[in-house]
Amino acid sequence: MSFICGLLIVVVAGACNALFALPMKKMTLWKWENQWGLWSVWALGIFPWIIALLTVPDLASVYGQVDSEVLWKTWLLGLGGGVGMVTFGFGLYLVGFSLGFSIILGLTAATGSLVPLLLSRPSDLLTPNGYVLLAGLAVTVLGVSLCGKAGIIREKGQQRSGKAAEQAGSGGKFWLGLVVCITSAIFNAMINLSFTAGAPIAEVARQGLAGETAAFRATNAVWAIGMSGALWPNVLYCGYLLTKGGTWRSFKAPGTRSYWLGGMVMGLVWMGGYALYGISTALLGEHGVTAGWILFFAVTVLVGNLMGFWTGEWNDAPREARRTMKLGVGMLLLSILIIGIGGTVLGNG
């Protein structure tokens, strides 16, 4: 039963991870650096610490009991993940929600799920549980590849019709966007590595907690450190762009008061999704960090693509592009079923 609960929670977490950027579509009077800079302060600098302080008593004492090497490793891997977040936001801006989510998060799911398992217990890949994870991962990658193919077909079709710039919001800089997306995927996986490296922090925190929610709440102590590392690449790069482009003044532009609330909501939804992911890993069993990561991003890609359809990114795409995208989304749903049903049968919970 706990596995099923974990599965449902990770689905909600993945949806949050996809929907958090939706307000950016409406914040048209701000440049990307205004939008992303405000998001990063809330999502990476404020909310992780609020959640940790509210759920983990005597947080400072917890960190004092953990080896400093663990704290630094968690922070540094979070820093690397922050680079992935910067390029993630820019990648969405260049190629649109659907293609950006597909390429970035699909590759992130692949690297972020397998690397922790390979580092900690590589022999588990040769067990029935491992075969299920690999099968689910293979289907996930296939689904992501189909989504990416659909995006390329869409791009070519819109270039012929002169609508690529309008749909992607980027002047049609598809190949630059592709490089940015791949770079983002490489660094994004470090967030899951940060979470894995911070396991000793969660263990110490759990010792001071009681009740059935102890394991869930303890993970928040890890996120606070990892996200603090991720904060710096985001605020430094956005600060550089704000200074270079003179867009600091855009924060005071008429008609942008609601944007401040939008940035806070973006941060809350995003960090809420990662907090829920941390809960799901405890419920999904011994391979929670691996299986949960795959499912987390499969759902994110799925919802991100649906959001792309809803916001009109595919309105003028060729029929072949829409058909290929639907097939890719179907494969992503299949990957969720493989991991979910397979994990239940094999008794991961």
Image: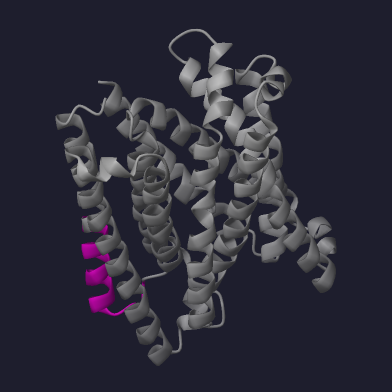
Residue 161 vs residue 14, the one in the foreground: 14
Quadrant housing the N terminus: top left
Q: Residue at the spot x=20%, y=40% of the render?
A: 127
Task: Determine whether, in the image, residue 205 is placed left or right of residue 149.
Answer: right
Region rendered in magenta = 315-330
Above or below, comparing residue 334 to residue 7 in the picture: below
Decide whether residue 322 is among the magenta residues: yes
Task: Determine whether, in the image, residue 249 is placed left or right of residue 255.
Answer: right
Which residue occupies the extreme bottom position in the image?
160
Image location (x, y in percent) of residue 237:
73, 62
Above or below, comparing residue 299 to residue 221 in the picture: below
Decide whether residue 250 is among the magenta residues: no
Which residue occupies the extreme front position in the image?
123
Q: Residue at the spot x=31%, y=33% of the render?
A: 7
Image location (x, y in percent) of residue 224:
64, 34
Q: Residue at the spot x=80%, y=57% of the render?
A: 251
> Is residue 187 among the parts visible in the rendering?
yes
Which residue occupies the extreme left position in the image?
345
Q: Residue at the spot x=26%, y=58% of the render?
A: 329
Magenta stretch mostly in which secondary structure? Answer: helix
* Colour mode of the rendering: one colour
Query: Which quadrant of the structure image shows residue 267?
Result: top right
Quadrant housing the C terminus: top left
> Is residue 29 among the parts visible in the rendering?
no
Which residue occupies the extreme top position in the image?
210
Image location (x, y in percent) of residue 114:
36, 50
Image location (x, y in percent) of residue 310:
39, 59
Q: How many marks?
A: 0
Query: Which quadrant of the structure image shows residue 282?
Result: top left
Above or below, comparing residue 121 to residue 252 in the picture: above
